[in-house]
Image (cartoon, rainbow, N blue to C red):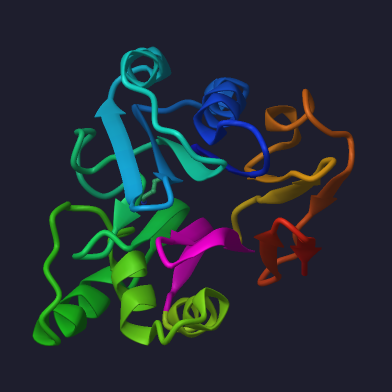
Amino acid sequence: MCGIVGYLGHRQATEVLVEGLSKLEYRGYDSAGVAVNTGNELEIRKFKGRLAILAEDLEKSPILGGLGIGHTRWATHGEPSDVNSHPHFNMDRTIAVVHNGIIENYMKLREWLTSKGYKFFSETDTEVIPNLVDYYYEGDLFEAVVKATSKLEGSFAIGVIAKNEPDKIVAVRKDSPLIVGLGKNESFIASDIPAVLNHTREVYLLEDKEFAILTSNGVEL
Ligand code: GLU
């Protein structure tokens, strides 16, 4: 179990993400992190330990941007550590992913990606996802996530963002929960409803293998 939150809207994403993650603390976790598209880059902050460590760090040194994803991790592959915390990213940090679940065929995928020149920094199963998305990325994040997830075996709820698509979050789930929240000129993804209840009551529970594309124009399923 862990928590995923994603936000796209007119507020500072980190504030919404940290607040949302705090509502998911009941699920248990060992580390927490966020990734925000600042317009220039995907800025990622993640720490082993309590959400308060992340929150304090962000208070001291804020990341500005209205689009981001956040995660509280419950380690299954790789010890709890800063490096193993989510979000995970591809080699050149242009794609970031938060993931809940277990990728059962990650060793095979990791070997295959390594043979294609990809490098890995963590011990997690999750890190194959941003690299697979990178492998398939040809300028359309949604298409790349569809192709990448078709290679995954196991369970996942994921949120994906790309530096080059500053107005988009792609989300999908299989055997792990994920909801979409619709606000006024803002939208959310989360592992569970309490994470978004302060902002909207309009909530949609994603079906298994259903994709959601969040943009400032709304949500496409
Ligand atoms: N399997 C992933 C990991 O160990 C995700 C764990 C989770 O659901 O928090 O990092």
Could you tell whether 142 is left or right of 9 in the image? left
Quarter holding residue 135: bottom left
Q: What stretch is highlighted in magenta?
A: 152-173
Q: Is residue 56 above or below residue 78?
A: above
Residue 65: give x, y in percent of width and height.
Answer: 50, 40
Numbered disc total: 0
Which is more toward the observer, 185 or 194? 185
Magenta-drawn stretch contains 171: yes
Image quadrant in which the C terminus is located? bottom right
- What residue do we see at 72% from left, 49% from top? 179
Q: Which residue is depicted at the point 38% across and 85% down?
A: 136
In this rendered view, identify the residue nearer to me: 103 or 218: 218
**Magenta-highlighted stretch: main secondary structure?**
strand
The answer to whether 163 is drawn above or below residue 205 in the figure is below
Residue situated in front as seen by the camera: 61 or 131:
61
Left or right, residue 204 beside residue 60: right
Q: In this view, does 84 lie above or below 193?
A: below
Report the side of 32 relative to 217 (left or right). left
Q: Residue sitting at 77 percent across and 61 percent down?
A: 217
User: From what the image shows, is residue 160 above or below residue 107?
Assistant: above
Residue 93 falls in which quadrant of the image?
bottom left
| Image point (39%, 75%), residue name | 133
